Structures are given as structure tokens and as C-alpha cells.
Amino acid sequence: RKGVKVRRAKPHEGYELYRGIALEKGLIVRPLELLNILSEKGLLRCYTATLNGSILASLFVLCTNKVTTYWLGGYHKKYSKYYPHSLCFWYAIRESRERGADIFDMGGIEYPPTKHAIFKYKFGGFIIRLYRLKVFV
């Protein structure tokens, strides 16, 4: 989108936006210290989308040699017309491929599809079904 810039960022740059969304949704807020440690070890990358110096979205992914996994993120709903979260995903996917990863895991989807699942479908790719079993002995 015109004027929106996406880049790799330090965890603290995208943290407050993520934290605010997590608190709003009643989710567990991961401590910034954890994100910093993972980033220093090369296991986490942060991406931000900005417009005129304001952060519109942040995205945190976990990285191994061949797999990149979406973990945390957030965006300002009032800027949704700029698609900042989508832009962060595309940037992260592209960078993931450039560093040799074979898989970009966007996390689970719900059935019937919710708005989050529909958002993920828009990126293409394919669905891998994973099953969780409970074993009672």
C-alpha cells in the first residue's frame, strides 16, 4: 500500500502494539525479555509496518533452518485499509524463502472457517491437517 514501509525491527519496536492487542483479547502476554533472548539467538524475527513514522502493525515469527512459524502480532484496526498486517506477512514470507526456509507456518485454522482462517487462506499455500489425540491409560 502506498506510503507503508515494512522492515525487520528489534522486538521492542513492535512489542507495545502486540502487547496491547494481547491484553485486549485476554491472551497471555509474552515478556519482552523472552523475545529479546530469542532474537539474540536468531530464533525470532520482528517485522513492523509503518506509515509516517507510526507503527501500524507488528509481526513476530519463530525461525529454524527450514521452518518459519508465525507466533505473535498485532495491528491498529483504524489503519486496516492499508493492510499493514498482510504486508508484514508477505515481507516475512519473502525473507523466509530468501534464507532457505521451505515452510512458513501460519498456525492453525478453525473449522468452520473464522475470519482468521479466511485471512490465512488468502496467502495461498496448502493446509496440513494435524490431529491431537488424548490417550487415557
Image: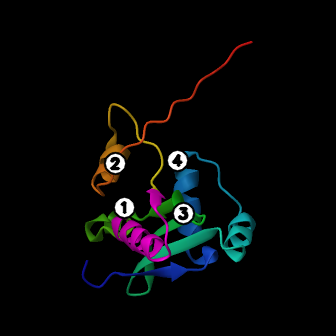
Residue lying at 43% horizontally and 36% vertically, measured from the top left = 129
Identify residue for label 2: 126
As measured in the structure, the alpha-carbon distance from the residue carrying label 2 to the one carrying label 3 is: 17 Å
State how far apart marks 4 and 2 are (Cα).
28 Å
Q: Which amino acid does label 4 sit on?
A: Lys
Kind of residue indicated by mark 3: Lys
**Residues tagged 4 and 2 counted as in contact (Cβ below 8 A):** no
Q: Looking at the image, which is closer to me, 51 or 5?
A: 5
Q: Do the residues labelled 2 and 3 touch (CB within 8 Å)?
A: no
Disc 2 residue type (three-letter): Phe
Mark 2 or mark 1, which has the lower sequence index? 1
x and y percentages locating residue 76 in the rendered image = 41, 65
Q: For mark 1, what is the residue?
A: 77
Q: What stretch is highlighted in magenta?
A: 86-104
- 63 left or right, relative to 78: right
Q: Which numbered disc, 1 or 3, marks the residue closer to the eye?
A: 3
Residue 63 location, x and y as percent?
58, 65
User: Decide: marks 1, 3 in contact (CB < 8 A)?
Assistant: no
Residue holding disc 4: 25
